[in-house]
């Protein structure tokens, strides 16, 4: 699905992402772990063509993301509040995203019905603009906005960090369901080793821009990761 | 404590991300301020002579007293527009061991360092010393100065209060302008004479210096009022102004334009719901009245078409010029989302051109009321309109692809130079020069109407080529896409 080739990105002479080769297959759930500054978010931004690689390339479905815009219709991402249009109400935002993906208003309403428990009554009809929502609720809007696009590739940057425990569990359940139903390819970065090993089929451990471990998840993965992160 | 807070402000200015650039700007603003203060002093010294020249044979002091209230009335209006609310990023301090009263005192002290507070001193003190002191004595002159200072402070604190109130509730705007407008109108229609009132009050004051206790009294009231308001409202949510329930809106008429319509709808919401773009849009609407300045009947009679056509271009194109200045930067807070979303760049660029065309059309329809003055103005404005939608809009989008600075759309617009860079000045230059370059050869070689025709026809041709332009602009945008994105991410 996504192929990375000799990718290098440096800021002020310091290499932040350096991935010689990586193949992400269709239907994989990739958990990206690593300490702050490992290059996780930068890698996501490179996949979304939001920053320019110094060398190398990323292809999605064999097309270079920096050259063609063909990846946009089947890719959805939520990295931070910069992906939300904060002066809209959540509803307006969903309708807007829906329209861009050719889904009618009724369609969007129908879709949002499944999110009642996820939103926990504090997002829809709240009478607030997105900028007035709490961080956690903004994140919920962002994630729902992604799933609304029914994407083939989904990128989430630290989705567990801002959510309450119940919603974290719900999110994991939802991602697993979506993955089974659609064979969605998902990339998640997280500091929560428990959750990320629970949800992922494959773990990439990054350190200073390099992928130093590439593991297929099994019952030993968690302890292996805990070993690495031990103080 | 206040000194410590001041030093923090000082640091926050110097250590901000683009300290160098804002320094250059501060220097320019500093020069302008110095110039204004110098003019005020100069005028202050000349006042006596000027007044006796303009009103020969009358009592200069009485004339002077007659103008004082006018001065403070216009002072309060100007303040409303340019006086900054002193802000301190208050959040980190609220939880520290600092008393609320200290924070408020800091906000109040800080707010007083504003050139507009010194202008009346420079303007009035020389006159008081030169004209009033010899005639009424030192005590009267002294108390007179005290009352001038008091009135200045009264204006200062009342404006802070009104501005803070109007952030919470926009009815305060209406009330404020209503009251000021009522005073001005009453004076204009001779219901009462502000000048006589002013002259009466201040000459009485000179005769009986004790009355001068009155102005410090009202200044103190304004200060206390402002202080108490701040004291009660020094909670974050009050400052942010929550409360009102927000409704979703849907612009059905845009639906038939597909994704372009959706994007235009987004821009409309952006304008309506955010302070800075809203005031830019308001200003371009208000400047519709510029027609009364530009379109002088004598210009039309004498055929000064060159001035008239440029007036027309600004009136019908001001929205493009000012909104286009920050075309992409308005969306800097969520530009990542726009670029990663399911939306190709070409549609995005095209939507901006459609927005320009739509708004200009509305402005053209409104401004065609000037046709009541002369039908020629309608022709003129039509040519200007075609030029704007065909050429001006392309220039605006082109220069927007060079604008890499994020702006905070929630902050007020006046005297806000955030996001201003060299490319903005070049843009302003282009806005003036391009129409002149098109007009001049035809205007000089044939006649003015040929120049106007050239602007209109070239505009129309360029407008018909809009798809071709969109491709070019998209390519230009893509060349600098990463630079724009990086710039917008740095807040």
Image (cartoon, coloured by chain):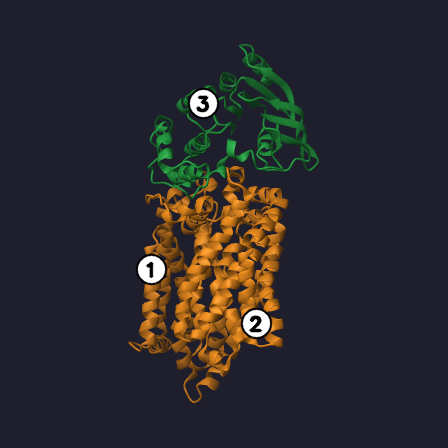
Chain colours: A green, B orange
Decide if residue B4 is in sight here: no
Which label belongs to residue B451? 2
Q: Which residue is mark 3?
A: A178
Q: Quadrant of residue B482?
A: top right
Of discs 2 and 3, which sits in the foreground?
2
Query: Of residues B59 and B130, which is closer to you in this image?
Result: B59
Q: Are the two marked residues, 2 and 3, in contact with CB atoms closer than 8 angstroms?
A: no
Parent chain of label 3: A
Q: Position of residue A82 (x, y in %)?
A: 50, 39
Q: Residue at the left extreme?
A: B191
> Relative to residue A74, is residue B17 depicted above or below?
below
Parent chain of label 1: B
Classify residue B471 as left or right of residue A8: left
Q: Position of residue A5 (x, y in %)?
A: 67, 28
Crowding near the residue tagged with mark 2, few <14, some 14–19, many ≥20 C-alpha atoms within 10 Å:
many
Classify residue B469 as left or right of residue B354: right
Q: Secondary structure at mark 2?
A: helix
Classify residue B258 as left or right of residue B423: left
Q: Secondary structure at mark 1?
A: helix
> Relative to residue B286, is residue A149 depicted above or below?
above
Of discs 3 and 1, which sits in the foreground?
3
Are marks 1 and 2 in one subunit?
A: yes
**Image point 47% across, 64% down: which residue?**
B316
Which label belongs to residue B302? none
Q: Quadrant of residue B137?
A: bottom left
Quadrant occupied by the C terminus of chain B: top right
Q: Which residue is mark 1?
A: B174
């Amino acid at each position: 699905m996504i192929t990375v080739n000799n990718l290098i990105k440096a800021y002020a002479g310091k290499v932040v992402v350096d991935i010689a080769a990586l193949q992400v297959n269709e239907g994989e759930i990739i958990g990206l772990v690593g300490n702050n500054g490992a290059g996780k978010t930068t890698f996501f931004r490179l996949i979304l063509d939001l920053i320019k690689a110094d060398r190398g390339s990323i292809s999605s479905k064999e097309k270079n993301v920096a050259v063609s815009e063909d990846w946009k219709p089947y890719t959805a991402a939520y990295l931070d509040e910069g992906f939300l249009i904060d002066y809209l109400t959540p509803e307006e935002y969903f309708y807007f995203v829906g329209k861009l993906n050719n889904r009618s208003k009724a369609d969007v309403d129908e879709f949002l019905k499944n999110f009642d428990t996820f939103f926990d009554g504090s997002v829809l009809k709240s009478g607030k603009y997105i900028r007035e929502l709490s961080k956690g609720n903004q994140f919920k809007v962002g994630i729902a906005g992604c799933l609304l696009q029914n994407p083939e590739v989904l990128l989430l940057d630290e989705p567990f960090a801002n959510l309450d425990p119940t919603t974290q569990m719900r999110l994991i359940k939802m991602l697993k369901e979506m993955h089974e139903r659609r064979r969605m390819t998902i990339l998640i970065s997280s500091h929560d080793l428990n959750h990320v090993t629970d949800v992922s089929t494959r773990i990439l451990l990054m350190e200073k821009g390099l992928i130093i471990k590439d593991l297929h998840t099994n019952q030993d993965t968690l302890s292996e990761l805990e070993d690495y992160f031990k103080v | 404590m206040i000194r410590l807070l001041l030093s923090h402000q000082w640091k926050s200015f110097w250590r901000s991300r683009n300290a160098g650039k804002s320094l250059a700007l501060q220097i320019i603003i500093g020069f302008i301020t110095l110039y204004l203060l110098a003019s005020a002093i100069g005028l202050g010294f000349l006042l006596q002579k000027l007044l006796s020249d303009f009103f020969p044979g009358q009592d200069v002091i009485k004339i002077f007293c007659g103008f004082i209230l006018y001065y403070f009335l216009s002072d309060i209006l100007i303040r409303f527009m340019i006086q900054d609310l002193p802000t301190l990023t208050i959040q980190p301090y609220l939880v520290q061991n600092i008393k609320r009263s200290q924070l408020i005192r800091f906000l109040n002290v800080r707010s007083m360092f504003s050139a507009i507070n010194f202008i009346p001193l420079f303007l009035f003190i020389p006159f008081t010393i030169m004209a009033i002191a010899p005639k009424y004595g030192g005590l009267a002159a002294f108390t007179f100065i005290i009352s001038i200072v008091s009135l200045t402070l009264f204006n200062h604190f009342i404006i802070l209060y009104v501005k803070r109130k109007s952030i919470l509730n926009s009815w305060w705007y209406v009330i404020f302008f209503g009251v000021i407008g009522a005073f001005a109108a009453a004076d204009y229609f001779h219901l009462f004479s502000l000048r006589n009132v002013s002259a009466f009050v201040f000459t009485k004051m000179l005769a009986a210096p004790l009355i001068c206790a009155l102005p410090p009294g009202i200044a103190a009231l304004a200060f206390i009022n402002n202080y108490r308001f701040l004291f009660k409202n020094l909670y974050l949510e009050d400052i942010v102004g929550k409360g009102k329930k927000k409704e979703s809106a849907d612009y059905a008429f845009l639906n038939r334009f597909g994704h372009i319509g959706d994007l235009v709808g987004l821009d409309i919401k952006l304008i309506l719901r955010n302070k800075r773009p809203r005031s830019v849009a308001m200003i371009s609407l208000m400047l519709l009245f510029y027609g009364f300045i530009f379109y002088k009947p004598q210009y039309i009679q004498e055929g000064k078409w060159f001035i008239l056509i440029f007036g027309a271009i600004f009136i019908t194109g001001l929205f493009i010029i000012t909104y286009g200045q920050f075309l992409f930067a308005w969306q800097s807070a969520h530009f990542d989302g726009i670029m990663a979303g399911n939306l190709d760049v070409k549609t995005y660029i095209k939507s901006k051109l459609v927005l320009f065309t739509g708004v200009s059309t509305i402005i053209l329809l409104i401004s065609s009321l000037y046709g009541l003055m002369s039908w020629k103005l309608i022709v003129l404005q039509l040519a200007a309109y075609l030029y704007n939608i065909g050429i001006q809009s392309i220039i605006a989008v082109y220069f927007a692809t060079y604008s890499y600075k994020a702006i905070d759309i929630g902050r007020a617009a006046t005297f806000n130079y955030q996001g201003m860079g060299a490319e903005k000045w070049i843009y302003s230059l282009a806005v003036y020069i391009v129409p002149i370059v098109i007009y001049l050869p035809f205007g000089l070689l044939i006649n003015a109407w040929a120049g106007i025709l050239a602007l209109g026809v070239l505009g129309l041709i360029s407008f018909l080529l809009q798809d071709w332009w969109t491709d070019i602009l998209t390519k230009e945008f893509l060349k600098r896409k990463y630079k724009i994105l990086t710039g917008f991410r740095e807040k």
